[in-house]
Image (tube, rainbow, N blue to C red):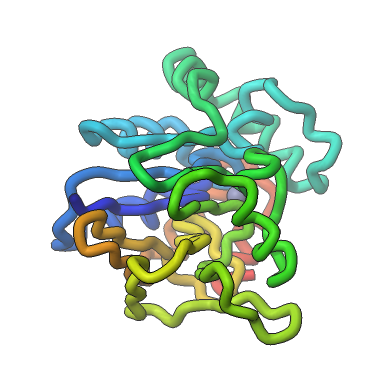
Amino acid sequence: MRILVLSDIHANLPALERILQQRLSWDTIWNLGDTVGYGPWPNECIDLVRSYPDSVHLAGNHDLAATGQTSTESFNAMAAAAAEWTSQQLTDDSATWLKSLGSISTEGDVTLAHGSPRFPAFEYITTAPQAAQMFSYFPTRHCFVGHTHRPMIVVEGISMPAEALFAPTPGQGFDLAPARALVNPGSVGQPRDGDPRAAYALYDTDMQQIAFHRVEYDVALTQQAIHAAGLPRQLADRLPPGR
Ligand SMILES: [Zn+2]
């Protein structure tokens, strides 16, 4: 089976649509959470991504905040403002669906978590030593996470240079058969690795291979909608530099 692995869509419909409109072959979607928050199309993104049969979805910290399941105390001002805006926009159906999601799940030999297998909704994996610790927190062969908005692959037992986490280049593929791996596909709707293009990964469960990809989308369209919605303008300003 081929899986389209998505994370941190953040209500950015043009970015999500652009990924889905490509002529890619995949069977279903694993969505690692933060479907909403920051962006101007929360209901549209939920309706689209959940429409795929057998798709798997997690709740991220922004999904929890927008549905009142966690406070926005730890959020910065613009994230809190966006969560408040999102909570007012969500339809009953969208809110009910978001509330039904967990922040960690197991699919075959892969653990899926929004942030980390240790603290699923909230922990950011940002250093190599921290990433190395994670392998004792999931029983499956691999673990896929999101939350940092940066693509990453860490292989168990391979020491990483200093504090740096390995960032795959777009188009790069990896054989997951030889060792356990911790993978982040990057963010669909708000990349923070200096590349504004929407990020995703394709996972082939039979071949045990994963490939990282980027695709351009209409950033200006999303910026206009952020402004029109009255969301904090920094949320639009950060899209072109991907920061
Ligand atoms: Zn996020």
The residue that appears at 18% across and 50% down in the rendered structure is 1
Q: Where 114 sits versus 202, above or below?
A: above
Locate residue 44, reporting x and y percent.
38, 35
Q: Quadrant of residue 21?
A: bottom left
Image position, residue 189 (x, y; %): 48, 55
The image shows a total of numbered marks equal to: 0
Residue 119 visible, this orientation: yes
Residue occupying image coordinates x 32% and y 32% = 50
239 sits to left or right of 46: right
Is 105 positioned to the left or the right of 68 in the image?
Answer: left
The residue sitting at 53% across, 52% down in the picture is: 145
Tell me: 116 left or right of 107. Answer: right
Residue sitting at x 28%, y 62%: 208
Q: Position of residue 205 (x, y in %)?
A: 25, 54
| Residue closer to the observer: 159 or 18 | 159
Q: Is residue 228 visible?
A: no
Report the quarter where the C terminus lies. Answer: bottom right
Dividing the picture into quadrants, the one containing residue 237 is: bottom right
Q: Is residue 97 above or below residue 151?
A: above
| Foreground residue among 1 and 124 | 1
Q: Is residue 46 above or below residue 200?
A: above
